[in-house]
Amino acid sequence: MTKQSPLSTVKIDDARKTIDPIFLNTNLLRSERLALSLVAKDETDNPIRSFKGRGTGYFLARLASDATPLVTASAGNFGQGLAYYGARQGRSLIVFASLNANPLKIEAMRRFGAEVFLAGEDFDAAKEAAKIYAIERNLQFVEDGASAAIAEGAGTIAAELTEEVEDIDAIFVPLGNGALAAGIGCWFKSKSPRTRVVAVAAKGAPCMALSHNAGAVISTPEARTIADGIAVRIPVPSAVEWLQDTIDDIVLVDDDQLLDAMRFAHETWNRLVEPAGAAGLAAILAQASALKGRRVATMLCGANLTENQIKEWLPSAAKVGGS
């Protein structure tokens, strides 16, 4: 694939003026525990407890100002972001989530005003149902990973990082549908080309890694990981194209490594992070010896965990009532 990415640092700058400030200028966490200089943007302290309020905010700001209902598919956090802004615009939102979706995220999407339908055994099956629903009713389908504005909104994290931290050697970015990695990479390739941009996918959901390495869309029969936010088995073609120009590498982390990262975040910063949101940190922990002496960055992307998940994965947090 040789198609040039349409992503723009000018639009990332514009997004910083457009997105609800409650999602911007997030806290920068630091640690020297690993014999390296680690910085992490905390994207969990906002109304939807994830970074998705950046991309959804910029996307809806650039959308025609009519009240046409929108349809999307989401594991939960993207849908929350669209619902948050949609309610402010008086725009209704229909979200399709899988039958196995996180109930906390489903409840949150509904609380923010979305109508949520459950369909299919996983995210991609729910997405297919959402597309059919939108086509049959002539409604606009919003696909995370297919809109440049969503990626550019997410890229505002990188813009903040380059202002807050000098000489970042590498940044590790969770990879699901690809908007976050593409937006982050777009900024760093332009503003700090020396920084190595590494996207991090779940070992049980490797379709984006396979597609990136092949330079073509490659689906997998299943996505089996505890990281529901990055459990993708059918890549978004536009995101696969964008990543050719915006990242240097993709690495895979397994569920045990994700759990290690979640525990590290809680022990080090008293933060509760969901598995997908800890993927970048998981890769840093796994590569810590090779990164010794370097300045590395990541982001904690989401914190929507059920009580049962906290008890199972972070028992020490459950004992003290969480962070």
Image (cartoon, rainbow, N blue to C red):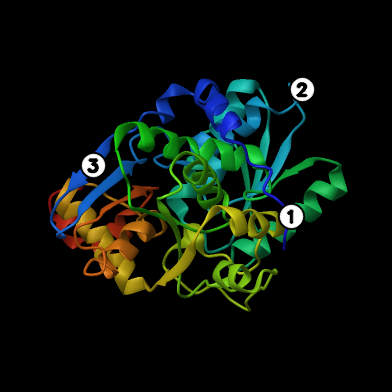
- Pointer 2 local density, CA inside 10 Å: few below 14, some 14–19, many at least 20: few
Amino acid at circle 3: Leu
Q: Nearer the viewer, mark 3 or mark 2?
A: 3
Quarter of the figure with the N terminus: bottom right
Residue 95 in the image: state x and y as whole percent.
64, 46
Regarding mark 1 in the picture, which secondary structure is present there? loop
Disc 2/disc 1 C-alpha distance (Å): 32 Å
Regarding mark 3 in the picture, which secondary structure is present there? strand
Regarding mark 2 in the picture, which secondary structure is present there? loop
Disc 3/disc 1 C-alpha distance (Å): 36 Å
Compared across the picture, whether 42 is left or right of 188 comes to left
Residue 51 in the image: state x and y as whole percent.
44, 41
Amino acid at circle 2: Asp
Q: Which residue is mark 3?
A: 29
Q: Which residue is mark 1?
A: 3
Answer whether residue 113 is visible to the viewer in this image: no
Q: Which residue is mark 2?
A: 66
Disc 3/disc 2 C-alpha distance (Å): 40 Å
